[in-house]
Image (tube, rainbow, N blue to C red):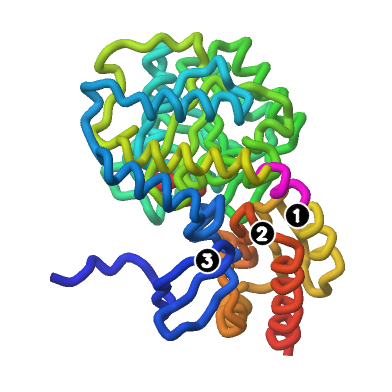
Amino acid sequence: MNLFDVYPIYNIEPVKGENCYIIDKEGNKYLDFYGGNAVISIGHNHPYYINKITDQLQKISFYSNSVIISLQTELATKLGRISGYENYNLFLCNSGAEANENALKLASFHNGKHKVVSFKNAFHGRTDGTLAVTDNMIISAPINTREHVTFVSLNDITAVEDEIKKGDVTAVIIEGIQGLAGINCPDNNFLTELHSLCKKSGVVLILDEVQSGYGRTGKFFAHQYAGIEPDLITTAKGMGNGFPIAGVLINPEFKAQYGMLGTTFGGNHLACAAGIAVLDVFENESLVGNAYKIGNYFHECLANVEGINLIKGKGLMIGLEFTYPTGKLRNLLIEEKVFTGSSNNKNVLRILPPLTVNKSEVDLFISKLQKCLKKVEK
Ligand SMILES: Cc1ncc(COP(=O)(O)O)c(C=O)c1O
C-alpha cells in the first residue's frame, strides 16, 4: 500500500531531535525554527518529558473515559494555575480541529443558536464544522457547507455587530493570532470590544489558541495581551510537545451533561503524562517568560535585518513579510540547515522556534537569514 500523497515534503528524514535542533539520517543538524508547525514547545526530546512518558508507559497507557483517570485532574489543575484560568473546566481531546469542533458545539448547546461569525483568512481545522468557519474554499469539499457562517474582516467591530444584529448567532470564533494566514494579530482594543459585544448579545466568544497558545507569544494565551476572558478557549499544538493532545477551556457558566461531548482517546494516560510533563517544564524553566524575553530580543535583531518588508507577531510567533514569494528563501534556508514555516500568504515566512530557544540560536538564525537574503536578492 502507498501513502495517500497529500503533503508536499522536503527530501529530509529527521531521526533525532535535540532541543532546538533536528538531526537527519545523514547526520545533518538543522536549526528548527518551525517547531514542527508550532508544536514543539519544550524542545525536542526533553529528558524530563521522556522520563514522564516512559514511566507512564510502564504503568498503564490507556483506558477509556469510563473510569477514574486522576492524571486528567492533575493536568487540569496545573493548566488552570499556569494559564490563569483556575475556575474554568477542561474538556480533553486529541487535535486542534477536534477542540474547535467541540467548542462550536458547546456554544450552540449553550444558547440554542446556530450561526457563526468568523474572520477572513481564518484557519480552524479540517473537520466539517471547523472547515465551515475556515476561510479557504480550496480545502473545502462540496459536503462542507457553510451557509450558517459569515466571514468579516479582522479588527472590523462594526461588521461583527451588523452580523450579530441579524440574529441567531451562536458564536464568534477568532484565532489568538492568525497563524496559517501569515501571522495577523487582532488589535487589543478590537478584542476588548468584541468581548463586550459578545457578552451583551449573549454570543459565545471562542478564542482559538491552538497555534498562538501555550506560551508561544510570551503570555500563556495570546488574547491575554488584551486582558479579556473569552467563554471558550481551544488549545492543542504546544500542549503535548508532539504527543497528540488538545483541550477546550470552558467558562464555569457552561453546564456539563453526560453524553454532551465525548471521545475515545481524549485524556488517555499517556497523553496526560505528556501534557503534565510539558507544564512541569514550563514552570521549572519559566518558558513563558523565556518566550517573552527571547521574543523581544528576536524582534530587536530582526529590526536590523535589511530586506524584510514587515515584522509581524508577538513573542516567538513571528511572521516575516517580504515583497516577493518566500519559496526560494525558504529553500536557501534549508540549504543553510534552518527550518522555517510557510503560510497561506506566499510572501510571509512563519518563525516558530521551541520556547526553550536562547540568544545564541537567535543570533545563528539571523546570520543565516542575512546570508540567504543576500543570495535571494541577486
Ligand atoms: C489556529 C489553528 N486552529 C486549528 C488548527 C487545527 O489543528 P489540528 O491540525 O491539530 O487539527 C490549526 C492547525 O494548524 C491552527 O493553526
Outermost left residue? 1
Residue 237 percent coordinates (x, y): 48, 47
Residue drawn 64% across the image and 67% down it: 347
The kind of secondary structure element at disc 3 is strand
Residue 110 percent coordinates (x, y): 42, 12
Q: Quadrant of the C terminus?
A: bottom right
Q: Which residues are magenta?
A: 287-294
Residue drawn 54% across the image and 59% down it: 35
Q: Answer whether residue 123 is visible to the viewer in this image.
A: no
In the displayed structure image, the side of residue 360 where residue 303 appears, left or right: right
In the displayed structure image, the side of residue 106 where residue 334 appears, left or right: right
Q: Residues within 10 Å of mark 1 (few under 14, many from 20)?
A: many
Q: Which mark is residue 357?
A: 2
Q: Which mark is residue 18?
A: 3
Q: Please tell me which residue lies in front, 150 or 189.
A: 189
Measured Cα–Cα span from mark 1 to mark 3: 19 Å
Residue drawn 54% across the image and 78% down it: 29
Number of numbered discs visible in the structure rendering: 3
Residue 312 percent coordinates (x, y): 73, 54
Specify the amino acid type for callout 3.
Glu
Residue 4 shown in magenta:
no
Residue 101 percent coordinates (x, y): 38, 33
Which callout, 2 or 3, points at the residue further toward the start of the chain?
Answer: 3
Residue at image mark 1: 294
In the displayed structure image, the side of residue 264 where residue 167 appears, left or right: right
